[in-house]
Amino acid sequence: MMRGAPHLFFPTCPKLTACRGHGTYMNPLSTSIIATVAGNVQKTNKLLSVQPLRARYTPEIGDLVVGRIVEVQSRRWKVDVAAPLLAQLPLSAINLPGGILRRRTSADELQIRTFFSEGDLVIAEVQSVHQDGSASLHTRSLKYGKLRNGIFLAVTGTGGSGSSGSNVKGGVGASSAVNSSLAAPGGSGTGGVVRSRRQVWTQETANGGGEVDIILGVNGYIYIYKHTDGADAASSITENVSISRLEEMASSTIYSSQNDDISPQTRREIARLSQCIQVLVQHGVRVDEETVTGSYEVSLQVDLEVGDDEDEEDEWRQEGREYLEGAKARRIIELLAQRLVKQKDQKKE
C-alpha cells in the first residue's frame, strides 16, 4: 500500500476476507484476497475489486470516440480506438458524398480509399460491441467523420483509458495541489478523459485566436482544431432539413484531407489548449469541459502574473511565456483547484 494513499493497492497486497471481484484473486492456502493489478480498490457491500491505474479503453454503446484508420479492407475499415482489439467501421455505416441514401455497391468498394485511408483521424460513435469485446462504429451523422485543421493528443488514465503508447502520460500520483474536486472518478490519482455531459464544444480563445473546437474522446484520444462554419451548418441540417434533403446540403468536402489556412494566432491558442490538457493529465486531474476551460483561462491569468515580473522588451522571455511547465504548471493547477472549489461553494449557497 502506498504511503499517503490508503485506498491504493499493489499486486500481492492482501486485503480482508470478502468476496473477490475483478483485479483480485484468492490464495488457496489462506483466506486473504490479493490484488493482481496496481490500482484503486472498490468495495460494493462485500465484493472487492481493483480498478487499474492504467488500462486500455473498454468500448460501450453510445461512446463518442476519436480513432485512427490503420487498415482498409474490402467493405470496412479497421480503426485504432485504444481498445484491446481494433474497431470496425463498415462501409454501410458512413454517409456517402452528397448525402445519397442507397445501398452500397461494388463501385463504392472500389472507391473506399477516397472516403478514409490509412492514417486518417475520424470521430465516430460506438454502435455495437461484439462478444469478443471489439466495437463497431458509425459516422452516419454529419457531426462525425474525418478530422483536420488541428492537433491530436492521446492521454492515459482511468477515465479515458488511453493506450500505453500515448503521447501524453499521466503521473502515478496526483499533485498535492489537487483536491477531491479535481481528481478523476474513483480517486485513483491518474487523470484522464471522463464521460461528461458534453464531449464536444467550441472554446472562445484569447489573443485573436478566434473559436476552437475541442473533442474529448471517451477512449482518451483528443482532437483540437480550428472552428469552421461547416460545423454550424451540420448542426442546423439535423434540425431544419428533412432526411430526404441531406444530399442538397452535404458534399464531398467532408472527406477532404486538405487542411485550411490557419492563422498564427489560432495555432498559438490551439497549442496552449494542448499544453493545458497535458498539465491536467500530468498532475492527475480529470479531463472534461470544466477543467479544460478553467485551466485555459487560468493559464492566461498566470501569463499576466509572469508578465508583471518580466521586461516586456525582452523578446526571448516573451516567447518562453508560451511554455506551460514546471512552476507555471503547478500554479495553474493551484488556481484551478481554488476556482472549482469556489464555484462549488457558490452552487451550495
Image (cartoon, rainbow, N blue to C red):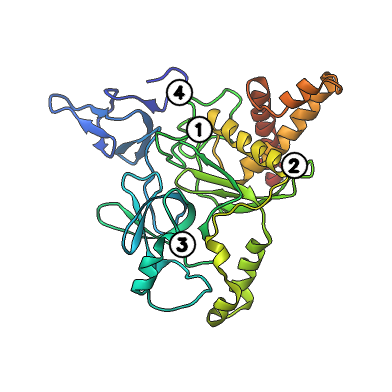
Q: CA distance from mark 4 to mark 2?
A: 42 Å
Which residue does the numbered mark 3 point to in the structure image? Answer: 115
Taking the spot 51% from the left edge, 37% from the top edge, the residue there is: 184
Whichever of labels 2 and 3 marks the residue nearer the N terminus, that label is 3
Whichever of labels 1 and 2 marks the residue nearer the N terminus, that label is 1
Q: Amino acid at mark 3?
A: Phe
Tell which tag, 4 or 3, sits nearer the viewer.
3
Which residue does the numbered mark 1 point to in the structure image? Answer: 168
Q: CA distance from mark 1 to mark 2?
A: 24 Å
- 225 above or below 250? above
Number of the label disc, if any, that sits on residue 346: none
Q: Nearer the viewer, residue 312 or 191?
A: 312
Q: CA distance from mark 2 to mark 3?
A: 31 Å
- 301 above or below 315? below
How crowded pointer 3 is (Cα within 10 Å; few <14, some 14-19, many 20+) is rated as many
Residue 325 lies in quadrant: top right
Whichever of labels 4 and 3 marks the residue nearer the N terminus, that label is 4
Labelled pair 1, 3 in contact (Cβ < 8 Å): no
Q: Amino acid at mark 2?
A: Gln
Question: Which quarter of the rendering shows the N terminus?
Answer: top left
Tell which tag, 1 or 3, sits nearer the viewer.
3
Task: Determine the secondary structure under disc 4.
Answer: loop
Whichever of labels 1 and 3 marks the residue nearer the N terminus, that label is 3
Q: Nearer the viewer, residue 270 or 119?
A: 119
